Image (cartoon, rainbow, N blue to C red):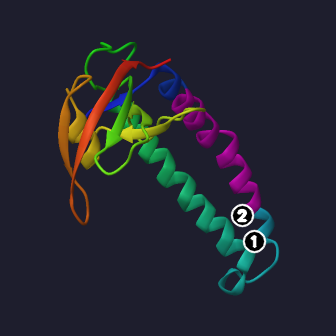
């Protein structure tokens, strides 16, 4: 897996989620499976199927989080003059008078005020390294956009 840029908050949140999923969540699912087995034949037991399905989802998320944390690079405060993981970028698309602000980082980031712009997305790749005043091209699904960088600042 390629490097994943995470803020310290996102890294800590993923650590807590991994801990919860590998301890109490596994125990909860195990008990659910035991109760479902008590209902008899597991071949036609919807509760058992649901528990096994949940167990699969939980284990897949555990593997995903473990991979993310192995390849994580914790970004404290990025330089505020260029778009990079750990910054907030304000942009204006060529066909819009309004501006939009994004937290630049991994899809695993969460923020109360900003949507997250993944550095691996086409728009994130186009903006990577841009400064305030720069205009970059972003190829969308139907056409190419001109995107103006209005402001770049460190994430809060």
> Camera-side residue: 77 or 2?
77
What stretch of residues is rendered in magenta?
A: 13-32
- Across and down, in percent, residue 146 comes to 22, 46
The extreme bottom residue here reads 44
Query: Which residue is identified by label 2?
Result: 33
Q: Residue furthest front?
A: 97
Q: Nearer the viewer, residue 60 or 138?
A: 138
Secondary structure mostly taken by the magenta-highlighted segment of the chain: helix
State yes or no: residue 3 in magenta.
no
State how far apart marks 2 and 1 are (Cα): 6 Å
Q: Nearer the viewer, residue 5 or 154?
A: 154
Q: Quadrant of residue 1?
A: top left
The circle on residue 7 is none
Asked if 48 appears above or below 111 in the picture, the reply is below
**Dot 2: within a 10 Å radius of its alpha carbon, few (fewer than 14), some, or many (20 or more) residues?**
some
Residue that numbered label 1 is attached to = 37
Marks 2 & 1, CB-CB < 8 Å contact: yes
Residue 41 percent location from the top left of the image: 73, 83
């Amino acid at each position: 897996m390629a490097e994943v840029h995470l803020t310290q908050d996102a890294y800590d949140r993923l650590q807590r989620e991994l801990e919860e999923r590998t301890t109490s969540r596994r125990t909860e699912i195990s008990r659910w499976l035991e109760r479902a087995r008590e209902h008899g034949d597991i071949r036609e037991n919807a509760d058992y199927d649901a528990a096994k399905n949940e167990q699969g989802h939980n284990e897949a998320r555990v593997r995903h989080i473990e991979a993310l944390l192995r390849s994580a690079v914790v970004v404290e405060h990025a330089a505020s003059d260029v778009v990079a993981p750990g910054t907030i970028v304000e942009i204006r698309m060529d066909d819009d008078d309004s501006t939009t602000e994004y937290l630049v980082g991994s899809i695993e980031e969460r923020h109360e005020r900003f949507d997250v712009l993944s550095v691996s997305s086409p728009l994130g790749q186009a903006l990577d390294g841009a400064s305030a005043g720069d205009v970059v091209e972003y190829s969308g699904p139907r056409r190419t956009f001109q995107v103006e960088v209005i402001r770049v600042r460190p994430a809060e």
